[in-house]
């Protein structure tokens, strides 16, 4: 009989990297002979604030913003709804999930008996800014020997003081520890004096051929060559100038994948279509960690930009680790934007496969040790 593994990760239906890392973890574990189910959870910022809490935060100058947002929401409601539905369908078709959703207040009394192991990761499940230090993300509901950290991310370089004691205790109780970034290993060492393996994101462990099988060509795409962008934060002026320059010199259409105003027809592409668009782009510009990863997987020329404005969404440690590991530091905008268009459109891929082989082996060896 196959041993059962429950995956605890961020389960939402609006982020490409989130859905694809969840799928990758599932497929890797299935490939090792496990029966795998994602345990849906809802914690931290996913929990809606009460009306009273929202009222306390309300300011009179919010009125104009609210009116503007309502007009925009009404205008784009249909495409947003379509996007959400596509993400839900992708998950239903490709990821086995529990029929229930766990929260701090609602955890099945027999959940520990339902699985032989639980893995938490990857994604930013240990980021207190998002998840508020929920015990669910540290598997505190499970027997200690079943708690496996499979390349989770803190997403930040230091833990706020109010979470440190709680984090120390929960991390100390993990049976096996790994993290996704070097900064995370340093946090664990500081909090618990334990060593944690630094593993790549599972999307890098699943091979390119498997991602190509999952990818799907969007019906809306034309035959024209394109420059793809995927920015979760605003696009800086210098970056926009660079995009316009490349587009003009190479006669490329610019697809703004996450921009309702400039490329509304592409806003609702699903995760499978997201893969296709990156794979077939002439150049991919992004501030997304997983966007950068799939550029590497598909060997698509890319430029990764710093995310601006929202400090909680900064991802420098993740990107630093990724680019350093693959000797691709020149793909950061600090270096790329100073290159000629021809140089940017050429990606040296000769060493990528060797790095992937090594990192995949380390990831699988960790699974073999942790889930015996």
Image: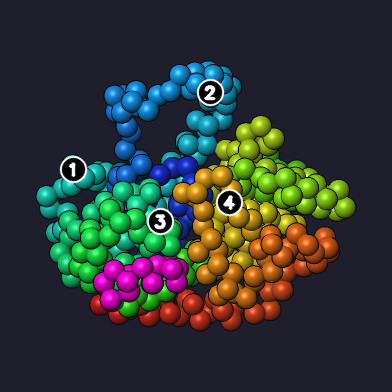
Outermost right residue: 249
Compute the Cα span from label 4 to label 3.
16 Å
**Left/right of residue 105 with respect to residue 333 in the rendered view:** left
Location of residue 174 with respect to 77 vertically, above or below: below
Q: What percent of the width, then of the height, locates residue 30?
A: 36, 66
Q: What percent of the width, then of the height, locates residue 287?
A: 60, 53
Residue 106, numbered circle:
1
The structure residue drawn at horizontal position 18% and vertical position 42%, both measured from the top left corner, is: 105
Compute the Cα span from label 2 to label 3.
30 Å
Asked which colour scheme the image uses, the reply is: rainbow
Marks 2 and 1: in contact by CB < 8 Å? Answer: no
Q: What percent of the width, then of the height, locates residue 35?
A: 29, 63
**Left/right of residue 364 with respect to residue 105 in the rendered view:** right
Compute the Cα span from label 1 to label 2.
35 Å
Residue where numbered disc 3 is placed? 124
The structure residue drawn at horizontal position 20% and vertical position 64%, both measured from the top left corner, is: 169
Q: Earlier in the sequence, mark 2 or mark 3?
A: 2
Marks 3 and 2: in contact by CB < 8 Å? Answer: no
Q: Which residues are magenta?
A: 180-193
Compute the Cα span from label 4 to label 1.
35 Å
Q: Earlier in the sequence, mark 1 or mark 2?
A: 2
Residue where numbered disc 2 is placed? 65
Q: Earlier in the sequence, mark 4 or mark 1?
A: 1
Secondary element at image label 4: loop
Residue where numbered disc 4 is placed? 307
Compute the Cα span from label 2 to label 4.
23 Å
Compute the Cα span from label 3 to label 1.
22 Å
Secondary element at image label 2: helix
Task: Identify the image quadrant of the C terminus.
Answer: bottom left
Between marks 1 and 2 in the image, the one whose residue lies nearer the viewer: 2
Q: Earlier in the sequence, mark 4 or mark 3?
A: 3
* Residue 3 can be seen, yes or no: no
């Amino acid at each position: 009989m196959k041993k059962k593994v429950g995956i605890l990760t961020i389960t939402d239906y609006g982020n490409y990297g989130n859905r694809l890392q969840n799928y990758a973890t599932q497929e890797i574990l299935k490939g090792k002979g496990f029966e795998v189910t994602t345990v849906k959870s809802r914690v931290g910022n996913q929990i809606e604030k009460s009306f009273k809490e929202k009222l306390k935060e309300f300011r009179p100058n919010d009125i104009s913003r609210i009116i503007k947002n309502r007009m925009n929401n009404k205008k784009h409601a249909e495409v947003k709804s379509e996007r959400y539905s596509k993400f839900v369908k992708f998950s239903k078709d490709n990821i086995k999930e529990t029929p229930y959703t766990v929260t701090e207040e609602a955890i099945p009394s027999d959940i520990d008996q339902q699985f032989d192991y639980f893995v938490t990761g990857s994604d930013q499940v240990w980021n207190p800014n998002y998840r508020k230090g929920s015990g669910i993300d540290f598997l505190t509901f499970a027997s200690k020997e079943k708690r496996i950290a499979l390349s989770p991310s803190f997403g930040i370089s230091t833990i706020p003081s109010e979470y440190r004691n709680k984090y120390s205790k929960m991390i100390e109780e993990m049976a096996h520890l790994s993290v996704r970034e070097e900064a995370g290993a340093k946090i664990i060492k500081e909090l618990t004096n334990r060593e944690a393996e630094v593993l790549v994101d599972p999307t890098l462990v699943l091979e390119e051929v498997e991602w190509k099988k999952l990818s799907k060509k969007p019906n809306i795409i034309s035959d024209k060559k394109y420059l793809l962008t995927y920015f979760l934060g605003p696009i800086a002026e210098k970056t926009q100038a660079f995009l316009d320059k490349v587009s003009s010199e190479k006669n490329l259409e610019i697809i703004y994948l996450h921009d309702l105003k400039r490329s509304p027809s592409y806003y609702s592409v699903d995760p499978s279509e997201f893969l296709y668009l990156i794979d077939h782009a002439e150049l991919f510009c992004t501030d997304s960690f997983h966007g950068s990863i799939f550029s590497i997987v598909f060997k698509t020329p890319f430029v990764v930009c710093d995310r601006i404005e929202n400090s909680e969404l900064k991802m420098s440690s993740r990107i630093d680790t990724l680019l350093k590991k693959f000797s691709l530091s020149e793909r950061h905008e600090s270096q790329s934007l100073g290159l000629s268009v021809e140089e940017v459109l050429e990606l040296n891929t000769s060493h990528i496969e060797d790095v992937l082989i090594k990192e995949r082996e380390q990831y699988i060896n960790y699974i073999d040790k942790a889930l015996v």
